[in-house]
Image (tube, helix red, strand yellow):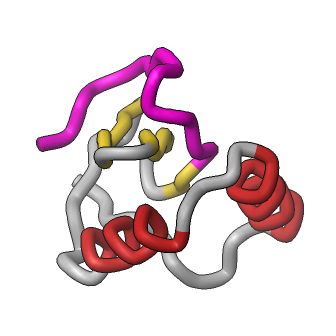
Amino acid sequence: MPEIRRQNLPEALLRHLLLRVREREISHEQIVLFAQWLDTHPEVPIGRWYKRFPGMTVCGEGELIKTFLLAGQVATGEELA
């Protein structure tokens, strides 16, 4: 299983992710939790997946993070522990 890509992200994807953080007002605390999780070098499935945090959900596909959802929004794919 791949690990999440943290370098050389497509520029359009990076802009999209930053926009979602701003638009959905993802808190600094949630970003810190997300960064700590990334530091564990989690393996993710090749297809769609998501990881729930207390105030947000991170959605991805394979090695790429695709978007950030608010806690009440519905995510699709395989839920990561």
The image shows residue 40, relative to residue 24, as above or below, that is: below
Asked if residue 35 lies left or right of residue 44, the reply is right
The image shows residue 66, relative to residue 19, as above or below, that is: above
Query: What residue is at 48 percent from the left and 16 percent from the top?
Result: 74
Query: What residue is at 43 percent from the left and 40 percent from the top?
Result: 57
Query: What residue is at 18 percent from the left and 77 percent from the top?
Result: 40
Query: Where does residue 15 sit, x and y in percent of width and height?
Result: 85, 63
Numbered range of the magenta stretch: 66-81
Query: Where does residue 28 sit, x and y in percent of width and height?
Result: 52, 72
Asked if residue 26 lies left or right of residue 3, the reply is right
Q: Nearer the viewer, residue 37 or 33?
A: 33
| Position of the C terminus by quadrant | top left
- Magenta-drawn stretch contains 75: yes
Q: Nearer the viewer, residue 7 or 32?
A: 32
Determine which quarter of the picture holds residue 26: bottom right
Query: What residue is at 83 percent from the left and 55 percent from the top?
Result: 19
Determine which quarter of the picture holds residue 43: bottom left
Q: Nearer the viewer, residue 62 or 81?
A: 81
The image shows residue 80, relative to residue 36, as above or below, that is: above
The image shows residue 78, relative to residue 34, as above or below, that is: above
Query: Where does residue 77 sit, x and y in percent of width and height?
Result: 37, 22
Asked if residue 43 lies left or right of residue 4, the reply is left
